[in-house]
Image: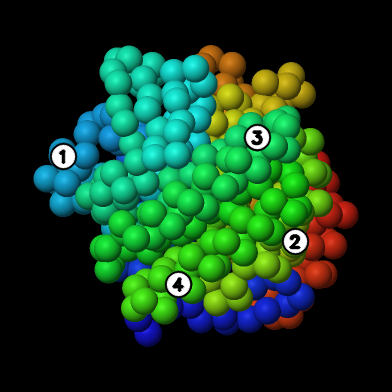
Amino acid sequence: MALFDVTIDARDGNARALTFDTAHGAVHTPMFMPVGTHATVKGVTVDQLHDLGSQVVLANTYHLYMRPGVDIIERAGGVQKFMNYNGPMLTDSGGFQLFSLDHMMKTDPDGVSFHARDYDGSKHRWTPESNMDIQQRIGADIVMQLDQCIGYPAEKEAVAASTKLSWEWAERCCAAHTREDQALFAIVQGGMHRDLRLESARRLMEIDAASRAAGHKGFQGFGIGGYSVGEPHDVMFETLGAVCDALPQDRPRYLMGVGNPTTLVRAVREGVDMFDCVLPTRTGRMGTAFSHEGRMNLRNAKYKEDFTPLDPQCTCPVCTQYTRAYLRHLVMQKEMLGGILLSIHNLHFLIDLMAKAREAVLAGEYEAFYQDWMNSPAANDY
């Protein structure tokens, strides 16, 4: 099987179990991908990531471009060698980070100019072509097109303009991306508007078809961006299923930046294959844990003398070795170990949840898996 060719191992309703190969190993979905923005998953070593069953790790193009710089990563032999992660990796284009710079960023049809206010204030200019060059030099197995992500709420006219710019940039990214050992994913935008999202998907598929007809690679997968940007949580599910239905069956679908356990379980049911989010490590550093009892705040006084495991149903190294009382002590003392251990647990929780989702799809039992989850205390994770 060629790199990035997809095998559909099973379907159960809209839920899918896929396998595809990368230059750094095979990937099995559904899966959660830990976020290593700066070429590190905060507080977690690469050996620990492998032990947790991590498949793909994310890094961010904007942040790596700013520091340590693309030249250094390229000289190291690519991002995997730079951070010593022997496994598949994905780089986000950095578009979301650019459009978070607000008044320090200006977009035009050709690209985006920005001041790196979160670094040294220096001026920079990106086009879809230069962004592809940066990501190809960083060297991850999967790269994302440069897109424009608009916040919520926004006028539909502004969302429509942003969506059009994103698919125009997708076409330019597709033409500029030439590295054969990398997959390029396009990104569906369209805000919370069903018609704009479906138009975005249709335009991206037209670009893909034209690229393949010309003997090129097209898109090897599709990201679904522009959700989880401030909208009420259930609003996403008003359009997510329709977007999945509109995308090709033989390519992965990646819901970007979403990491609540229940959201993952619901989104797999709609046809999503891949997820990422900073939530498990960020909330871990804040003293919060996912669990089969729902989200737990370890600052709560009720855990002060609770000498039971963090989550008795969890088999991660934290739950098999440490008590709630000890973890609360670490959190309250602001000991760095507390955030590290909770990050490890939260990552395991999501990675293991998606492994069990895959097992359910393969067994033809995903609906039962979904209903069991939704009717359990674990679903109270917001």
Quadrant assignment, res 232: top right
| Quadrant including the C terminus | top right
Q: Residues within 10 Å of mark 1 (few under 14, many from 20)?
A: few
Residue 183: percent from left, percent from top? 38, 64
Quadrant assignment, res 318: top right
The reply to whether the C-beta atoms of the residues labelled 4 and 2 are less than 8 Å apart is: no
| Residue at far right of view | 375
**Disc 4 to disc 2, C-alpha distance:** 26 Å
Which residue is labeled 3 in the image? Answer: 158
Q: Nearer the viewer, mark 1 or mark 4?
A: 4
Whichever of callouts 1 and 2 sits on the residue coming sooner in the sequence is 1
Q: With respect to residue 172, does 306 lie above or below?
A: above
Quadrant assignment, res 86: bottom left
Whichever of callouts 3 and 2 sits on the residue coming sooner in the sequence is 3
Q: Residues within 10 Å of mark 2 (few under 14, many from 20)?
A: some
Whichever of callouts 1 and 3 sits on the residue coming sooner in the sequence is 1
Please name the amino acid that badge 1 sits on. Asp
| Element carrying mark 2 | helix
Q: Is residue 325 visible?
A: no
Which residue is labeled 1 in the image? Answer: 71
Please name the amino acid that badge 2 sits on. Gly
251 on left or right of 155? left
| Element carrying mark 3 | helix
Residue 309: percent from left, percent from top? 65, 41
